[in-house]
Image (cartoon, grey):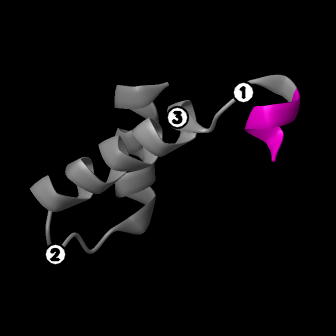
């Protein structure tokens, strides 16, 4: 409904989620969650 009211979509959020999924796929089996979040912030922030 938001698209019809304001002509806005969630494509930017979906794109960012896809980038996070691709990043996670590269580092399968990571053990340190803090390091994963650190790398994620460094790359995409």
> How far apart, in angstroms, are the residues tagged by discs 2 and 3?
28 Å
Discs 2/1, front = 1
Q: Residue at x 74, y 35 (%)?
A: 3
Q: Describe the element under mark 3 as helix, strand or loop.
A: helix
Q: Residue at x 64, y 34 (%)?
A: 9
The reply, left or right, for residue 14 in relation to residue 39 is right
Percent x, y of residue 2: 81, 40
> How far apart, in angstroms, are the residues tagged by discs 2 and 1?
36 Å
Tell me the number on the disc at residue 8.
Answer: 1
Q: Quarter-wise, where is residue 36 in the image?
A: bottom left
Q: Residue at x 16, y 60 (%)?
A: 25
The reply, left or right, for residue 5 in relation to residue 43 is right
Discs 2/3, front = 3
Q: Describe the element under mark 2 as helix, strand or loop.
A: loop
Does the stretch in magenta take in 2?
A: yes
Query: Where is 36 relative to 31, above or below?
Result: above
| Residue under numbered circle 3 | 11
> How far apart, in angstroms, are the residues tagged by discs 1 and 3?
9 Å
Q: Dot 2: few (<14), some (14–19), or many (≥20) neighbours within 10 Å?
A: few
Percent x, y of residue 39: 34, 41
Q: Closer to the N terminus: mark 2 or mark 1?
A: 1
Q: Main secondary structure of the magenta part?
A: helix
Q: Residue at x 72, y 27 (%)?
A: 8
Q: Nearer the viewer, residue 22 or 27?
A: 22
Q: Total label count? A: 3
Q: Closer to the N terminus: mark 2 or mark 3?
A: 3
| Residue under numbered circle 2 | 29
Query: Where is 22 relative to 43, above or below?
Result: below
Q: Which residues are magenta?
A: 1-5
Percent x, y of residue 12: 53, 31
């Amino acid at each position: 409904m938001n698209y019809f009211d304001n002509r806005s979509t969630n494509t930017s959020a979906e794109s960012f989620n896809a980038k996070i999924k691709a990043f996670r796929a590269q580092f399968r089996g990571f053990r340190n969650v803090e390091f994963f979040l650190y790398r994620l912030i460094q790359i995409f922030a």
